[in-house]
Amino acid sequence: MKIINKEIEKKDGKNEIKESFVNPFENFKNQSLNTETIIKTIDIDINKAKFKVIDIAKKEIPEFEIDDNNKEIINQLFNYFIGNKEYCELNNISLNKGILLCGGVGTGKSKLFKIFKIFTAEILRKNYFRMFTSSELTDNVNINGVKVLENLNHNFYENKPNPINCYIDDICSKNEKIKHYGSEISVIEQVINMRYNIFDTYKKLSHFSTNIVPKNLIDFYDIRIIDRLNEMCNIFELNGLSRRK
């Protein structure tokens, strides 16, 4: 099976999707199997671990279904979070980047991250992350000021004021902009800039989800922000119609 890696590519001042067929022999020049990566490789029985993911999904989201639209993404997320270097090399997934998961409204992006948040924190005890929503961050900044974004730098698992991996749900919302000292700012652009600096300095990862297809990110953020998302994240796309009933 041919796997397509989708990545944001700038062309003539605009962004397009570049689809490149993976050459498994070329992937190894990007990420050696013996090289330490930000996502840690977990020594775990893969089949048992997959059943753990299914058990978490059944318990936390009883209506959750695995089908042709999401099974490939679930497999990619699973192998990414266990740090399966061989799989990720073959599928052109970097273990030194976070994930930007794109997909239509109601396709299950937030639920997938909820499942893998529990899986990484309780089963793997590695590669875990905190969860925020873009609306929660925007509302908090609107009420309490940009200082509240410092919560993105706090490791609540170890009660230390140092950065940790995090996930921001539902970016590219029309409600991200607020008035701040008389000027209009995009809270999520501030977040992306902050998380980029954390990525660059501390090698902590950021994951995001959005209802927007990658080529339309330019409608919400400027080129500099998209550059940073591209540098920080693997781009995954979740297909299918809304699962909401």
Image (cartoon, grey):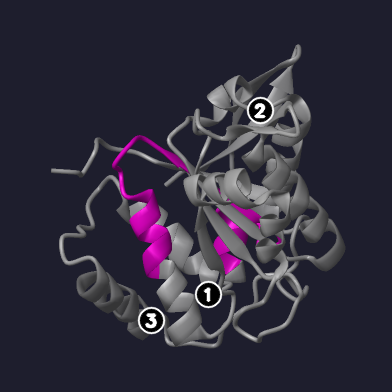
- Image side of residue 188 versus residue 113, left or right: right
**Magenta residue check for 105:** yes
Marks 1 and 2 sit apart, C-alpha to C-alpha, by: 31 Å
Which mark is in front, 2 or 3? Answer: 2
Q: Is residue 63 above or below residue 44?
A: above
- Using the image, tell me which numbered label, if any, was put on residue 49: 3
Position of residue 45 measured from the top left corner of the image (x, y, whole percent)? 43, 87
Asked where in the image residue 51 lies, by quadrant, the reply is bottom left
Q: Amino acid at mark 2?
A: Tyr
| Contact? badges 3 and 1 (CB < 8 Å) | yes
Residue neighbourhood size for the residue with mark 2, other residues' Cα within 10 Å, grouped as few (<14), some (14–19), many (≥20): some
* Mark 1 or mark 2: whose residue is earlier in sequence: 1
Q: Is residue 229 left or right of residue 100?
A: right
Q: Position of residue 34 (x, y in %)?
A: 75, 76
**Sequence order check, earlier mark of 2 and 3:** 3
Visible in this render: residue 204? yes
Residue 99 lies left or right of residue 196; in this view the side is left
How far apart marks 2 and 3 lie (CA) works out to 37 Å
Task: Read off the residue under disc 2.
Answer: 221
Which numbered circle lies on residue 118? none
Give the magenta part as a residue range: 86-115
Closer-to-camera residue (71/55): 55
Q: Is residue 93 magenta?
A: yes
Which labelled disc corresponds to residue 82?
1
